[in-house]
Image (tube, rainbow, N blue to C red):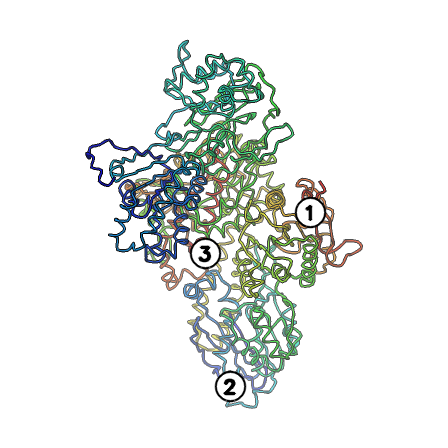
C-alpha cells in the first residue's frame, strides 16, 4: 500500500468531531499519531504520553515512569474536559486495558469517546522508527503492537467508543479533513426572547389561551409569534384531552422555526409504545394511544424521537431541560445527561404516594446559567437558586405556565378542568417562597476560602482567605440573622492630610480631590458622632416573612456596621420601630416610594448608647487618669516653684497639657448623654438605600436629603435631619462659605462633615470610580482619635505622615460590595448571593488599615 | 505620672543623698521612651519630698512600636512598667542600696511615704492592700471617678495611692519596682526568661513568703505558664500546679469542673462505640488532646470559630506525639452554616458551646448538627443556671461568662433537647456533671442524643 500513488486531488475523508469530546488516537509506534495530531489539532489540545514521560523524567522514552506519566496525563485530561475543552490522547492505546480508563473518563465527564485508528503497515512503522534516534526498541515491539491493534478492531464499539474512524494508508491520512461540529444541545447563538412553556400533557385549549395571552397570533393554519420563540419543556403527551392537537401544533411551530421542543419522560415512553415496544399503559399513556390515529403513529414517533435532550441557549446563560440539569452536565453528550434531562435524579425510593423520591438538585445548584424545567407538578412556579420549575400541573387542574425570558416573568392560565387526579395533592403556597425556606440554611462553602465577588461597579473583588476567616468569626459570633443583612456600610476615607498649621484635616483637601477629578459640585453633609446604624423597616410584621423570608413576623432590624443588633432591649427596639413606622406613614413614604419596606443608612446617637464599654474603658478612663495625674503634677511643680526651684518651663508645659486634657474630655462628653428611653435617642438617616424594586443609587444626594428631611419632620423628637450645603467647587466664595460652616460646627463640638459628589455613584473624566464620600473631621473631635496631645506642633508633624491611599481603595471596594448586595436583594436573588457581598464587606474590614483614618 | 517620696527622718534632706539627687535643683533624664524630671516640692530639715515626673511621648511610642499602645492611652498619666524602668534608671544607685555619703542610712528603716499619681489597680484597692500591707505599709488610696459629669459610669481603675512605712529607702523602691506593674497587670516590653532573674533578684527576702506570691509571680511574668513554673521552682523547688491565680472573674472552680465534664463526655463517647469524633467549638483543643490519647478514638475533627483559640489548639496539637497528633484535624468553621466537612462522623461533642450562640439562631445550629452533620451520637453540655445561686462570687442575674448569651435551667435545657430529639429522630438521656445540689441540681448538665434510625428503635 505504500506504493499506492493516487492523484493528490482525490476525495477528502471527513472526520467530524463534536466540539467537546475525548479523542483517542490508536496506533503502533511510528504509525504517525503525533504528526496527525499536530496537523489537525491545537498543540494544547493534544496530550501525548511521550511528552508526559519527558516532563517527569527528562526522557520521552523512559518506560520506567509510564505509570506516573499516565496518571498526570489523566489528571490534565480530566481538568480539560471539566473545563469543556476538546482533548486528544496521543498514546499507542493499542491495548483494551489502556483504552478502558479513557472511555471511563469520557463517560464521567459526559462527553463522547471517539477513536481514530491509524492502522498503518507494519513495515512503514518499522521504517519510521529506524530514523528516529531515540526509538531504539526492537522490531518485535512494533510487530506486537500491530498485532494488538488488529485484535482491537472488533472491540472498540463494545468498549464504548461512540464514533470510530480507521485510516489504513498514508494516502488516507493525507486526505483527512477534520471538522468540528457543535453538540446538538448547543444553541448558544439563539438569544431569544423566549417564552418557555411548562408540561402541556395534551391541554390544547389552555395552550392556545396561553399563547394568545403571550401575544402569539392564533391563525387557523398557523401560529405567528410576536418576534419571540416558544420553547416547550416536554411532556406534551399523556393524560390530557387533546394530545394529537398539541403534537400537531408543536410540530408545526418547530418546523416553522418558531419553537424549540425538548422531550419529557412521557414523550420518550410514548415513542417506545408507538414503535411497538411493550409499555404498560399507565400514567396516562392509554389516553395518548387512544387519541392517536394509527396513521400518525410513525410521524409522531419520529418527531418525538428526534428531540434533543436539552438546550443551552443565550450564550450559555439559559439552560432548558424537562427535569432539570446540573452545571456539570449542561451542554454535554452522555447517556447520563439524557437520563437526567428526562427523569431527573431520584433516590430509587418512593414516597407515601408511590412517587419516586427526587433528589433536589436545584437546592445544590450553583451554576451561572438560569435553568428552566418542568416534570414535577408544583402549586406555583418558584425560583430556587436561579432555577425554576414551570410545571404547575395544568392537567391536574392547576395552571399552564410560561416564563418570559429574558424578562423572567411568569404568565399563567388556569386549567379548564381537572383532567387527571394527581397522585400527590398540590399543596397551596405558604408565606415564604421555596427560595426563602431554602435560604434558612447557608453553606460554609459559599463564604470561606479565597473568593472573588463580581459587582456591577467593580469586577472580581478579591476576598482573601484570612480575611474571610475573620469575617466568619464576626458573622457567627455577633451578627443578626443573615436574612436581615442586605447591606453593610462601607468605610470612609478622610481627606488627605492638611498642611495647614494646627490641623490635620481640612475641607480644602476634600474639595481639591473632587475638583481634580472633574466634579463641579459637591454636597457637604454634617457628620454626626454616634454609631453607624442600618435600619430596615417593614410596613407590617408579615413583610419580614414574605419579603425577607424570616420564619417569624418582625417589624424590622437595626444593626451596626458589623451586622450586630443595635438594641439589647427588645421593648425599646419595638418602640423604636413603631415610631419609625408612624413617621414613614405620616410622611407618606410608603406610597411615595411604592414599597412596604425601606432600608436606611443612618447614624444613631448618642455615641454612648452603643459605645459605653469603649467609653468607660478607654476614653473616660484616659481622661480620669490624665486629670488626676496632671492636677497632682501642677501642685507639686507649684510647690517647688514656691521653694525657689526653677521649674517654670515644666509649669508652662504641664499647664498646657492640662488644658488640652480638658478639651479632650469636653470633646468626648459632647457625644454622651444618658439613654433612659426612646426619647433620649436621635436617629439621623442620610441615605434611603433601597425599597421594593429599587436601589436608590441613581438618585442624587439632594433627593436623599430632601426626602429624608420630610421624614424627619414627621417625628422631630426622634429623627434628626442632617444639615447640608451644596458647594460649587469652581467658586471660591462657595468653598469658603462651606469651610466657614465647617469651622463653625466643629468649634461647637460637632464631629465634622462628609463631602460627597452630588450623584450617588460618581466617576471622573476617565470613567474611573471616585470616592463616594470623604470625611473632614474637626480639630477637637480628632483628640478622641489621636489623643489629647495631638495638636502640639511636634505631634502634628509626626501624624502628618499618614497615607489615605489604602483606605480609599478599601472604601471603593466596600461601597461596590454594599450596593451589589442591595441590588441582588432587590432582584430577589438567593440569600447566599447577597450574603457573599456583605460577608465581603466584613472581610475587607479586617484588612490591616490604620483604624484612625 | 508623678511619684513623690517624702521622709520625716531628721535631717530629712538626707533623702537627697540617698537618692543621689540634689534637693535644690530640678534635673531631667533622657529615657528611651521619654524623659523623667526630678525635683523637690519641699526640702526642709523636718520634711523633705522628692518628685519624679515621668514624661511619656504617647504619639512617638505609638508610631515607633505600632500596636503596643493606642494614641488614646493612659500610659503617660499612670504608673506602669515604664515607671519601674524609670526608677531603675533615675534612682538606680538608691535601688541598689549604695550611698557614699550616708552609708549607714542605706539599710536603716526610716519613716517614708510614697505617693503615686495615679496607679491603675486591676483588682481594686483590696488587692492594693493585700500587696502592700504584708510588707508593713499603711495604705491609703483615693479612687477616681471615670467622669464626674456621668456619675453613673462609676469609678475608674485609677487610684492616688499613699504608702507609709518605716523602711529602708532601697526596700521601698524595690517594692514599687516590682508591684507597680503587678497592680497594672501589664508590661510594655516583651517578657522573657531574663524577667525571672529580675524577679528573683528584686524579690529576694520578701517575695517567697508573701501571701500573694502566686499572683505576683503570675502577673509579673505576664501569665506565661512556662516562666511562672520556672520561677516557682527557683523559689522553693516545689513545682506548683496551680491554675490561673486571678485575672478574670473565676466563678467556677474551672479546673475541677472542666475535668469532670471531659470525663463524663469521654465516658459517654466510649460507651457509644464511636471512633470518629467531632469536637464542635473545640476552643484551644484540650478535649481533643484528651481524646487523642484514647485508642478507641482514631479520628478527631475539632472545629472552632475563634481564630485565636484555633491557632492555640494547633500549637497544642503540634506538640503531641505523632500518633496522637495525626488523629487530630483542626478546622475553622461556624455552627451557623451547613458544612460538608462535618459529615460522616460517629459522634459529636459540644462542651459548653451552645450557651455562646444567639438564642434566636439556635434553630439553624440544630439543623447544622442534627440534620446535616448527623452523627449517631451527639453530646451537649451547658451550665445549669439554677446552680448559679451557689457561686458566691457571681452577682445575681449575671451569667458565668461575659460571652454567654443564655444560661438554662434543667427544665429549659431538657425541653430544648427533647424538641430537637423529636424533630430529628434522636433519643435523648440526661446526666448531671459535678456535685448535685439537692435543691438546684448540678453545676453543669449533659444531654446524650442517639440517632434512632441507627439504634433500630424506629
Q: List x then y, in percent, for residue A646.
A: 43, 76
Vertical position of residue B204 compared to residue A347: above or below: below
CA distance separating discs 2 and 3: 44 Å
- Tell me the tag on residue A413: none
> Residue at the spot x=51%, y=88% of the render?
B99
Q: Are marks 2 and 3 on the same chain?
A: no
> Which image quadrant for residue B396?
bottom right
Q: Chain of mark 2?
A: B
How crowded is the residue under tag 3: few (<14 C-alpha within 10 Å), some, or many (20+)?
some
> Which image quadrant for residue A565?
top right
CA distance separating discs 1 and 2: 79 Å
CA distance separating discs 3 and 1: 55 Å
- Tell me the tag on residue B17: 2
Callouts 3 and 1 close, C-beta under 8 Å? no
Q: Nearer the viewer, residue B453 or A608?
A: B453
Q: Secondary structure at mark 2?
A: helix
Foreground label between 2 and 3: 3
Amino acid at each position: 500500500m505504500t506504493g499506492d500513488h493516487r492523484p493528490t486531488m482525490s476525495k477528502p475523508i471527513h472526520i467530524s468531531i463534536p466540539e467537546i469530546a475525548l479523542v483517542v488516537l490508536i496506533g503502533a509506534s511510528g504509525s504517525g499519531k503525533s504528526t496527525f495530531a499536530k496537523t489537525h489539532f491545537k498543540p494544547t489540545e493534544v496530550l501525548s504520553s511521550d511528552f508526559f514521560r519527558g516532563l517527569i523524567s527528562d526522557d520521552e522514552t523512559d518506560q520506567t515512569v509510564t505509570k506516573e506519566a499516565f496518571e498526570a496525563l489523566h489528571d490534565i485530561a480530566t481538568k480539560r474536559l471539566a473545563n469543556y475543552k476538546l482533548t486528544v490522547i496521543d498514546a499507542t492505546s493499542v491495548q483494551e486495558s489502556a483504552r478502558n480508563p479513557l472511555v471511563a473518563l469520557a463517560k464521567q465527564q459526559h462527553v463522547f469517546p471517539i477513536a481514530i485508528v491509524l492502522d498503518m503497515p507494519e513495515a512503514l512503522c518499522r521504517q519510521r522508527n529506524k530514523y528516529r534516534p531515540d526509538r531504539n526498541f526492537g522490531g518485535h515491539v512494533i510487530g506486537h503492537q500491530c498485532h494488538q491493534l488488529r485484535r482491537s478492531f472488533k472491540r472498540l464499539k463494545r468498549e464504548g467508543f461512540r464514533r470510530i474512524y480507521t485510516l489504513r494508508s498514508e494516502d488516507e491520512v493525507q486526505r483527512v479533513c477534520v471538522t468540528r461540529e457543535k453538540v446538538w444541545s448547543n444553541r448558544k447563538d439563539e438569544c431569544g426572547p423566549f417564552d418557555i412553556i411548562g408540561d402541556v400533557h395534551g391541554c390544547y385549549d389552555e395552550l392556545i389561551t396561553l399563547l394568545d395571552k403571550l401575544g402569539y397570533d392564533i391563525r387557523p393554519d398557523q401560529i405567528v409569534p410576536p418576534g419571540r420563540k416558544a420553547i416547550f419543556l416536554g411532556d406534551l403527551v399523556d393524560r390530557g384531552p387533546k394530545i394529537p392537537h398539541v403534537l400537531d401544533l408543536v410540530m408545526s411551530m418547530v418546523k416553522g422555526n418558531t419553537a424549540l421542543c425538548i422531550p419529557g419522560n412521557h414523550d420518550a415512553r410514548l415513542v417506545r409504545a408507538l414503535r411497538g415496544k411493550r409499555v404498560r399503559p399507565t400514567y396516562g399513556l392509554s389516553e395518548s394511544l387512544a387519541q392517536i390515529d394509527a396513521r400518525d403513529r410513525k410521524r409522531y414517533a419520529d418527531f418525538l424521537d428526534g428531540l434533543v435532550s436539552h438546550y443551552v441557549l443565550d450564550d450559555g446563560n439559559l439552560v432548558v431541560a424537562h427535569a432539570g440539569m446540573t452545571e456539570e452536565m449542561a451542554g454535554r453528550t452522555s447517556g447520563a445527561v439524557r437520563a437526567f434531562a428526562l427523569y431527573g435524579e431520584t433516590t430509587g425510593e418512593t414516597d407515601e404516594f408511590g412517587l419516586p423520591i427526587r433528589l433536589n438538585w436545584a437546592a445544590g445548584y450553583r451554576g451561572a446559567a438560569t435553568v428552566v424545567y418542568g416534570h414535577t407538578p408544583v402549586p406555583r412556579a418558584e425560583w430556587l437558586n436561579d432555577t425554576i420549575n414551570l410545571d404547575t400541573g395544568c392537567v391536574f387542574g392547576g395552571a399552564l405556565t410560561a416564563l418570559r425570558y429574558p424578562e423572567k416573568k411568569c404568565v399563567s392560565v388556569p386549567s379548564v378542568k381537572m383532567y387527571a387526579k394527581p397522585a400527590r395533592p398540590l399543596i397551596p403556597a405558604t408565606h415564604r417562597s421555596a427560595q426563602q425556606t431554602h435560604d434558612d440554611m447557608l453553606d460554609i462553602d459559599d463564604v470561606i476560602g479565597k473568593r472573588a465577588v463580581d459587582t456591577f461597579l467593580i469586577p472580581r473583588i478579591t476576598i482573601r482567605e484570612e480575611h474571610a476567616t475573620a469575617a466568619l468569626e464576626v458573622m457567627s459570633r455577633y451578627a443578626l440573622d443573615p436574612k436581615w443583612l442586605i447591606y453593610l456600610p462601607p468605610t470612609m476615607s478622610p481627606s488627605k492630610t492638611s498642611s495647614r498649621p494646627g490641623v490635620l484635616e481640612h475641607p480644602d483637601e476634600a474639595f481639591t480631590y473632587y475638583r481634580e477629578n472633574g466634579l463641579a459640585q459637591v454636597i457637604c453633609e454634617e457628620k454626626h458622632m454616634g454609631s453607624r446604624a442600618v435600619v430596615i423597616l417593614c410596613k407590617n410584621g408579615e413583610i419580614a416573612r414574605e419579603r425577607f423570608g424570616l420564619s417569624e413576623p418582625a417589624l424590622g432590624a437595626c444593626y451596626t456596621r458589623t451586622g450586630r443588633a443595635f438594641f439589647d432591649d427588645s421593648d425599646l427596639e419595638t418602640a423604636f420601630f413603631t415610631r419609625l413606622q408612624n413617621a414613614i406613614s405620616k410622611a407618606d413614604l410608603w406610597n411615595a416610594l411604592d414599597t412596604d419596606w425601606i432600608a436606611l443608612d443612618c447614624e444613631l446617637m448618642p455615641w454612648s448608647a452603643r459605645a459605653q464599654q469603649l467609653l468607660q474603658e478607654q476614653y473616660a478612663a484616659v481622661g480620669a487618669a490624665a486629670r488626676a495625674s496632671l492636677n497632682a503634677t501642677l501642685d507639686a511643680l507649684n510647690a517647688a516653684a514656691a521653694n525657689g526651684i526653677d521649674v517654670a518651663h515644666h509649669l508652662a508645659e504641664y499647664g498646657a497639657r492640662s488644658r488640652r486634657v480638658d478639651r479632650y474630655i469636653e470633646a468626648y462628653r459632647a457625644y454622651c448623654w444618658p439613654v433612659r428611653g426612646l426619647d433620649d435617642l436621635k436617629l439621623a438617616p442620610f441615605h434611603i438605600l433601597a425599597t421594593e424594586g429599587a436601589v436608590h443609587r441613581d438618585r442624587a444626594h439632594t433627593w436623599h436629603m430632601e426626602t429624608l428631611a420630610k421624614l424627619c419632620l414627621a417625628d422631630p423628637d426622634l429623627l434628626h435631619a442632617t444639615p447640608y450645603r451644596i458647594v460649587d467647587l469652581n467658586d471660591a466664595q462657595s468653598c469658603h462659605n462651606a469651610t466657614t460652616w465647617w469651622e463653625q460646627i466643629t468649634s461647637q463640638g460637632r464631629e465634622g462633615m462628609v463631602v460627597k459628589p452630588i450623584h450617588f455613584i460618581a466617576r471622573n473624566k476617565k470613567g474611573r470610580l471616585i470616592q463616594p464620600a470623604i470625611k473632614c473631621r474637626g480639630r477637637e473631635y480628632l483628640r478622641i482619635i489621636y489623643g489629647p496631645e495631638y495638636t502640639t506642633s511636634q505631634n502634628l508633624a509626626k501624624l502628618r505622615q499618614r497615607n489615605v491611599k489604602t483606605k480609599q481603595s478599601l472604601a471603593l471596594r466596600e461601597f461596590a460590595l454594599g450596593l451589589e448586595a442591595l441590588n441582588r436583594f432587590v432582584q430577589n436573588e438567593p440569600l447566599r448571593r447577597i450574603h457573599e457581598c456583605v460577608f465581603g464587606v466584613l472581610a475587607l474590614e479586617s484588612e490591616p488599615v490604620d483604624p484612625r483614618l | 505620672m508623678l511619684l513623690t517620696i517624702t521622709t520625716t527622718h531628721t535631717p530629712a534632706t538626707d533623702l537627697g543623698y540617698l537618692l543621689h539627687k540634689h534637693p535644690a535643683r530640678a534635673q531631667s533624664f533622657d529615657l528611651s521612651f521619654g524623659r523623667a524630671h526630678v525635683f523637690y516640692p519641699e526640702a526642709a530639715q523636718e520634711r523633705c519630698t522628692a518628685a519624679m515626673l515621668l514624661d511619656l511621648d504617647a504619639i512617638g511610642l505609638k508610631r515607633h512600636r505600632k500596636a503596643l499602645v493606642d494614641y488614646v492611652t493612659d500610659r503617660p498619666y499612670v504608673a506602669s512598667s515604664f515607671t519601674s524602668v524609670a526608677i531603675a534608671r533615675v534612682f538606680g544607685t538608691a535601688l541598689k542600696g549604695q550611698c557614699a555619703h550616708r552609708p549607714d542610712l542605706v539599710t536603716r528603716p526610716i519613716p517614708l511615704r510614697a505617693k503615686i499619681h495615679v496607679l491603675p489597680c486591676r483588682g481594686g484597692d483590696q488587692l492594693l492592700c493585700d500587696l502592700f500591707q504584708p510588707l508593713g505599709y499603711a495604705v491609703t488610696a483615693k479612687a477616681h471617678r471615670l467622669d464626674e459629669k456621668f456619675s453613673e459610669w462609676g469609678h475608674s481603675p485609677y487610684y492616688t495611692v499613699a504608702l507609709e512605712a518605716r523602711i529602708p529607702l532601697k526596700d521601698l523602691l524595690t517594692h514599687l519596682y516590682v508591684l507597680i506593674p503587678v497592680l497594672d497587670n501589664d508590661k510594655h516590653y516583651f517578657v522573657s526568661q531574663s524577667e525571672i532573674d529580675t524577679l528573683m533578684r528584686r524579690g529576694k527576702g520578701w517575695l517567697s513568703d508573701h501571701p500573694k506570691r502566686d499572683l505576683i509571680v503570675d502577673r509579673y511574668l505576664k501569665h506565661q505558664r512556662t516562666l511562672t513554673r520556672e520561677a516557682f521552682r527557683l523559689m522553693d523547688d516545689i513545682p506548683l500546679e496551680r491554675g490561673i491565680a486571678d485575672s478574670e472573674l473565676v466563678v467556677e472552680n474551672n479546673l475541677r469542673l472542666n475535668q469532670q465534664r471531659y470525663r463524663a463526655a469521654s465516658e459517654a463517647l466510649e460507651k457509644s462505640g464511636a471512633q470518629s469524633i467531632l469536637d464542635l467549638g473545640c476552643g484551644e483543643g484540650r478535649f481533643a488532646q484528651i481524646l487523642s490519647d484514647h485508642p478507641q478514638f482514631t479520628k478527631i475533627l475539632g472545629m472552632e470559630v475563634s481564630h485565636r483559640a484555633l491557632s492555640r489548639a494547633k500549637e497544642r496539637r503540634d506538640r503531641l506525639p505523632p500518633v496522637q497528633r495525626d488523629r487530630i484535624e483542626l478546622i475553622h468553621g461556624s455552627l451557623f452554616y451547613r458544612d460538608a466537612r462535618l459529615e460522616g462522623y460517629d459522634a459529636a461533642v459540644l462542651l459548653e458551646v451552645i450557651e455562646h450562640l444567639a438564642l434566636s439562631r439556635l434553630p439553624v445550629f440544630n439543623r447544622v448538627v442534627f440534620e446535616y452533620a448527623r452523627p449517631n451520637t451527639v453530646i451537649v453540655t451547658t451550665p445549669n443556671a439554677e446552680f448559679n445561686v451557689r457561686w458566691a462570687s457571681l452577682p445575681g442575674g449575671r451569667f458565668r461568662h461575659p460571652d454567654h448569651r443564655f444560661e438554662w435551667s434543667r427544665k429549659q435545657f431538657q425541653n430544648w433537647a427533647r424538641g430537637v430529639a423529636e424533630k430529628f429522630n434522636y433519643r435523648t438521656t440526661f446526666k448531671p456533671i459535678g456535685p448535685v445540689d439537692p435543691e438546684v441540681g448540678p453545676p453543669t448538665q449533659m444531654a446524650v442524643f442517639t440517632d434512632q434510625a441507627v439504634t433500630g428503635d424506629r
